[in-house]
Amino acid sequence: MGVNLGDLIPRKETTLEELSGKSVAIDAYNALYQFLSIIRQPTGEPLMDRTGRITSHLSGLLYRTANLVEKGIKPVYVFDGTPPSLKEAEIQRRLKAKEEATIKYEEALKRGDLEEARIYAQATSKLQDYMVEDAKRLLTLLGIPWVQAPSEGEAQAAYLAAKGHVWASASQDYDSLLFGAPRLVRNLTITGRRKLPRKNVYVEVNPEIVELEEVLNVLGINREQLVEIGILVGTDYNPEGVKGIGPKTAHKMIKEYGRLEALEASLRARENGLPENWRQIKEIFLNPEVTDDFKIEWKTPDVEGVVSFLCGERDFSEDRVRNALEKFKVGMRELRSKKTLDAWFG
């Protein structure tokens, strides 16, 4: 779900070309779910190999990463570890939503309504363990670094950006800002032409840059207050938020009262009010569990290894895979021309 702060956050549209030469820590689970949701057959089913193993996530990972590298962007994928126990309610909510979407998907198929079926199918995506392992294997073969987070991948990505290991964190969610990422890139893995649900209308989706310092300056708050606004609106650790409070109201309240403590008594009295564990939630954002046990190094792709894995084991088209791998070479040549090859290879 992520925290819904879109109405408050100033952001600037950019292009992949303008991000050339930049290193970006991508929330891997966020990206893989996008690929599983978007890359589907006309009936709504995901791409699969001959044994029935889902490959949509691998398709998205290969071709989107190839596009990024071709533009000179240096991705680092960050994988989730064990989620905080406070996230259990949100995890159960998501599972229930997927079950409901599965029922509606099957009903739409029976009616022969393929467009409706595809919409519901996108909401049924589940990231299974073998998919994660396949993604890590592919990234290793591609020479793209990945980091295993001890807990929230988004927190680890924000940490990499805050410590200067990468230029920015990349995710669709604004949680990265609450975790302290100085710079957030949105839409990085879904940039391009996209069809609007239930409409025969296409829109162009472009990357967006959000600067934490600008956000705080525009809103007239500090990061701790931004976290408190998030708690009022609702986070993955208190999904419902405080009833009746949206982003603008939450901002107004925090600006007026300064700290959440000043509002605690009145908010607790509300139906679906402030949770008793809000301080624990705040601590997760301000001091998340992260690790320094990683090495970020971009390497030359193992072309034949990628072909053997994707084409020999997962039934990908060899021509398409080799064409995608050519983009990696283009990206590396571009970096050489800019005399940044040393930066690329760490």
Image (cartoon, rainbow, N blue to C red):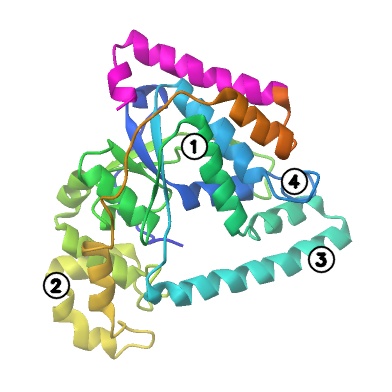
Upstream in the sequence, badge 2 or badge 4?
Answer: 4
Amino acid type, label 4 = Met
| Residue for badge 1 | 140
- CA separation, marks 2 and 4? 51 Å
Q: What stretch is highlighted in magenta?
A: 319-346
| Residue for badge 4 | 48
For the C terminus, give its image quadrant. top left
Upstream in the sequence, badge 1 or badge 2?
Answer: 1
Do tag 3 and tag 1 residues touch (Cβ < 8 Å)? no
* Vertical arrangement, residue 283 with respect to residue 116, above or below: below
Amino acid type, label 3 = Glu
On residue 259, the disc is 2
* Vertical arrangement, residue 106 with respect to residue 304, above or below: below
In-image side of 36 versus 302 (left or right): right
Asked if the magenta segment contains residue 322, the reply would be: yes
> Callout 3: 10 Å neighbours few (<14), some, many (20+)?
some
Upstream in the sequence, badge 4 or badge 1?
Answer: 4
Upstream in the sequence, badge 3 or badge 4?
Answer: 4
